[in-house]
Image (spheres, rainbow, N blue to C red):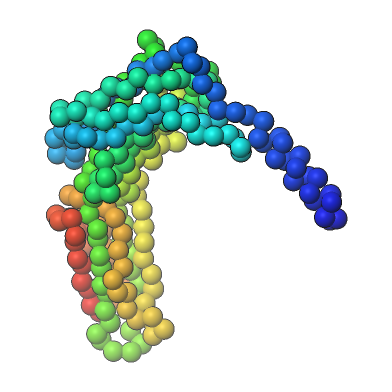
Amino acid sequence: MPKRLSLAIWLILIAFFSCEDTEIENNIRVLVHGNVVDQNAQPIAGASIRVYADANAVGADRVLLGEGVSDATGNFSVTSLFGPNDLFLVDVSLNDQFSTYRYQTNTEEFTPFNLTFNLETVELNELATFTYNIIRESGENNTLQYRFTYFDSNCIEVFEEGVLDQSQSFCNSLRFTGSNLNNLSPNAENRSFIVPIQSQVEFTHSINEGEEVSEIITINSADYAFEFSY
């Protein structure tokens, strides 16, 4: 394809997808409120609450509409600007030691009752680093197939017209990681992933393509070390 024609098509695509701007209604305010707790239902103070709008189009900006923090009892109340956009987002977070939460909806055709978004109870889970070492000690030519099954630490809940849409939401989703160990790569050393503390990890392995064996590991510390040899 000639370069000039390619450039013309690219410019047309940019113009087409960049025509939508993030909208803010300066005369409309909404209230976002709720309560933040940890995995033990204990209140979390000082959690950050940020409210955004996004037209979800190339060239459109994500705009910070309002922000606040939770109080000593975990409660928060944020007055925010509002606008009809494809994405209305509320992000709740604390620090790197805790999971994050996102409330997401579409406000192009939806305005909440009494201009209030009630997030009710938001749970942020304390996180743990799961580090594992798998070492071959049985000699050459022995192989190991392994995988870890665990829960994703973060949560995104998508609402349509104020109703939770499970099909688009991602909370407590299962994740997998693993590998095949052989003569070319007999060990898996100092590998890690992040999981919620007090959650469970399933370790499944098969030696020399034999029967699979599984064990359940309960994560009871912020730095969990797992050792396995074959």
Residue drawn at 33 percent across, 44 percent down: 154
Relative image position of residue 190 (x, y in whole percent): 28, 71
| Quadrant where the image shows the C terminus | bottom left
Q: Observer-nearest residue: 136 or 99?
A: 99
| Residue 102 in the image, given as x and y percentages of width and height | 37, 35
Extreme residue toward the bottom, this view: 140
Query: In the displayed structure, would residue 78 be above or below residue 143?
Result: above
Quarter-of-image position of residue 223: bottom left
User: Which residue is depicted at the point 18% across and 40% down?
Assistant: 39
Q: Is residue 64 left or right of residue 18?
A: left
Q: Position of residue 40 (x, y in %)?
A: 14, 39
Any part of residue 32 in sight: yes
Q: Is residue 164 visible?
A: no
Give the x, y percent position of residue 76: 25, 25
Question: Residue 8 occupies which quadrant of the picture?
Answer: top right
Q: Nearer the viewer, residue 188 or 19?
A: 19
Q: Nearer the viewer, residue 197 or 203?
A: 197
Residue extending farthest to the front is 26
In front here: 226 or 214? 226
Q: How many marks?
A: 0
**Vertical comparison of 222 with 72: above or below:** below
| Residue occupying image coordinates x 30% and y 47% | 153
Q: Quadrant of residue 184?
A: bottom left
Side of 42 relative to 164 (left or right): left
Q: Quadrant of the N terminus?
A: bottom right
Q: Is residue 46 left or right of residue 8?
A: left
- Lateral position of residue 142 relative to residue 37, left or right: right
* Residue drawn at (22%, 54%) of the image: 128
